[in-house]
Image: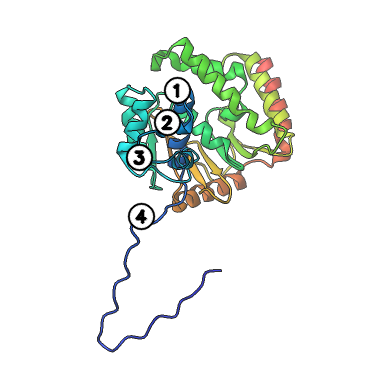
Amino acid sequence: MHSVNTPRRTQPGRKQPRKAMRVGARIGPTARRIALGTELRRMRNEAGMTLEQAVKGLGFSDSHLQRVETGSIALKQASHLRSLLKRYGITDEERIATLTQLHRESASQEWTSFASTVHPTARTFADIEGVARAIKAWHPTLILGLFQTKRYATAIFEMEKLHDETTTEYIEQSVRLRMMRRELLTRSEDPVHLWAILGEAALRHVVGDADVMREQYAEIAALSERENVTVQILRTHEVGYRFGTNFTILDLGETLPSTVQTDVPWGSLCMSDKPREVGRFSRKFSSLQATAMPPEKTVGFLQQLSREVSDA
């Protein structure tokens, strides 16, 4: 409950003094801070350094860096970030520019667009996803990544290889990361709670071949039987709310702000933990829930799709 302060009385006609702004007031953790912190921790580990070695002579403490790596606080100066990157042997100008921008925006809750060069961005989203307690996701055109089998995921990346000019190594690493993300649903301790709504078009679009799709249907059906997973399907003929782009809402617990993520057409992803945006997408998800089939009909519909793709 918020406390209410009684305003002081002032003499008639006398202006009240303007309240001083707190300089350097602490802003709580944001998705960007988590993103930057996880990248810095990964780079430090890859460089084989302890926290003490990483900060030696840089003007801030190892405990400060530790809190930066967990997303609790931000680096005070951009020069500190540049010093760390130099110490970690990071010389790629594009990567440095991306991290510098992330640092600059790490106190903001506005939408941030990440470049599509898979590995800092996909790994960063996976890190944020990894601390989620609950996830709500809407996917209208492709199977949700957390549900994808290895063969389905590989076929998706292979389809994009011609357009994105990616390498075989890129595909293998991307698929491996996607398979690691799936462990959120099946881990023995505290698995994430997922409520997913899939568009019927996502299920009917054949990726790979009929055998790949049958395996994929069976996998979604099996996951939907888990206590922590709920799956709904939005039929194409249903009259009701639609939203054309996939999005994911991440509940990051009591100490971190909820975050919404959505893909954009040029292959990048956007994230925001601004309460207004999270609330807007939460209302969208509720409308999609109301239009989609009840969860108890999901398995039967997937079995029907499996028979249909076999007969095709």
Amino acid type, callout 3: Gly
Query: Dividing the image into 4 quarters, which one contains the N terminus?
Result: bottom right
Residue receiving disc 4 = 24
Which quarter of the figure has residue 103? top left
Q: Residue at x 50, y 44 (%)?
A: 259
Q: Secondary structure at mark 3?
A: loop
Q: Residue furthest front?
A: 57
On the picture, is 78 further left or further right than 70?
Answer: left
Query: Pointer 1: residues within 10 angstroms few (<14), some, or many (20+)?
Result: some
Residue receiving disc 1 = 47
Residue receiving disc 3 = 59
Residue receiving disc 2 = 54
Compared to 202, does 250 lie above or below?
Answer: below
Q: Residue furthest top?
A: 168
Amino acid type, callout 4: Gly
User: Depth-wise, is mark 3 or mark 4 nearer the camera?
Assistant: 3
Query: Pointer 3: residues within 10 angstroms few (<14), some, or many (20+)?
Result: few
**Dot 1 and dot 2 residues touching (CB under 8 Å):** yes
Q: Position of residue 138 (x, y in %)?
A: 55, 38
Q: Position of residue 42 (x, y in %)?
A: 48, 28
